Image (tube, rainbow, N blue to C red):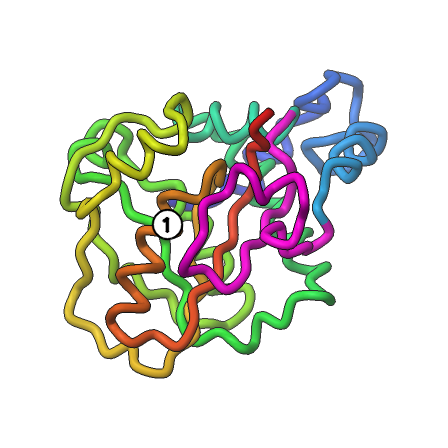
């Protein structure tokens, strides 16, 4: 999937959040951009956060980074892109990913050998037409000059994970993933998804990668959906 053309962007004259007139080529006005920045996680390893320890189930991830907490406007953009194919939401996310990658001073991405997207089942891909995690992973790999490697396959259909509790998520994801023939020995892998909540999906894939002799697996997501 490609980003919006320059001609398409030139037709956008209102902030997509508050609908005020924009004075320059953008999608979000300066005030809304300030609000967006207030929910960023500044490249923190959220596995070290006290408020994440009770909700994120992790055995195999070395680190887990998210750009922002899963709230407005990011949750809105992700939903519009993921379920409606909304081009403006996709472009807003694209610009945001680039801006967050440009501020990665606390995150040494050079240490990674592969950028691996979390897969979706082929039936969901057929219905949706794309995998948002693949889209994000491609941006990350291209921007940071790392190898993009879609080596994990979703071999079992599971229901949407957002509404399920941690135990249900773990149960549903058992034996849900398979690995394409790949040499992973000694490699450090960055595993990319759009939203992380309990970390069950990332943990299951990291388990598979580590069993195939990867040196380490770290996670990266657009947002972290904190559980109450």
Task: Answer few, some or many: residues within 10 Å of disc 1's Cα (few below 14, many 20 plus, some between 14 and 19).
Answer: many
Q: Residue 181, position in %: x, y? A: 15, 70
* Front residue of 77 and 118: 118
Is disc 1 placed on a helix, strand or loop? helix
Magenta stretch, residue numbers: 42-71
* Front residue of 204 and 178: 204
* Front residue of 141 and 210: 210
Which quadrant of the figure contains the N terminus? Answer: top left
Residue 70 occupies which quadrant of the picture? Answer: top right
Q: Residue 23, position in %: x, y? A: 83, 31
In the rendered image, the vertical position of residue 51 relative to residue 118, given as above or below: above
Which quadrant of the figure contains the C terminus? Answer: top right
Is residue 50 highlighted in magenta? yes
Residue 159 in the figure: left or right of residue 11:
left
Q: Residue 87, position in %: x, y? A: 48, 30
Residue 15 in the figure: left or right of residue 2:
right
Total numbered labels placed on residues in the image:
1
In the rendered image, the vertical position of residue 30 relative to residue 177, given as above or below: above
* Front residue of 89 and 115: 115
Farthest-out residue, bottom: 186
Residue 31 in the figure: left or right of residue 227:
right
In the rendered image, the vertical position of residue 171 relative to residue 201, given as above or below: above
- Name the residue beneath numbered marker 1: 134
User: Residue at 54% across / 61% down in the picture?
Assistant: 63
In the rendered image, the vertical position of residue 200 relative to residue 210, given as above or below: above
Residue 216 in the figure: left or right of residue 76:
left
User: Residue at 17% across / 47% down in the picture?
Assistant: 175
Q: Residue 177, position in %: x, y? A: 21, 50
Farthest-out residue, top: 19
User: Residue at 56% across / 39% down in the picture?
Assistant: 54
Is residue 94 highlighted in magenta? no
Residue 115 occupies which quadrant of the picture? Answer: bottom left
């Amino acid at each position: 999937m490609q980003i919006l053309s320059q001609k398409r962007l030139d037709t956008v004259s209102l902030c997509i959040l508050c609908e005020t007139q924009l004075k320059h080529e953008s999608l979000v006005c300066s005030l809304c951009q300030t609000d967006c920045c207030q929910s960023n996680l500044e490249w923190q390893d959220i596995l070290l956060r006290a408020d994440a320890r009770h909700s994120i189930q992790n055995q195999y991830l070395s680190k887990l980074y998210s750009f922002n907490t899963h709230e407005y406007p990011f949750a809105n953009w992700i939903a519009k892109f993921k379920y409606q194919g909304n081009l403006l939401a996709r472009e807003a996310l694209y610009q945001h990913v680039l801006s967050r990658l440009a501020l990665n001073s606390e995150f040494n991405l050079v240490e990674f050998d592969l950028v691996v997207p979390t897969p979706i089942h082929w039936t969901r891909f057929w219905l949706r037409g794309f995998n948002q995690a693949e889209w994000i992973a491609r941006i990350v790999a291209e921007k940071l000059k790392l190898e993009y490697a879609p080596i994990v396959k979703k071999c079992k259909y599971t229901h949407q994970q957002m509404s399920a509790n941690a135990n249900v998520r773990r149960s549903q994801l058992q034996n849900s993933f398979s690995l394409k023939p790949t040499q992973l020995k000694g490699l450090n892998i960055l595993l990319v998804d759009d939203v992380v909540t309990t970390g069950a999906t990332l943990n299951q894939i990291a388990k598979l990668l580590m069993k195939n002799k990867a040196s380490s697996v770290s996670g990266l997501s657009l947002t972290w959906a904190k559980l109450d």
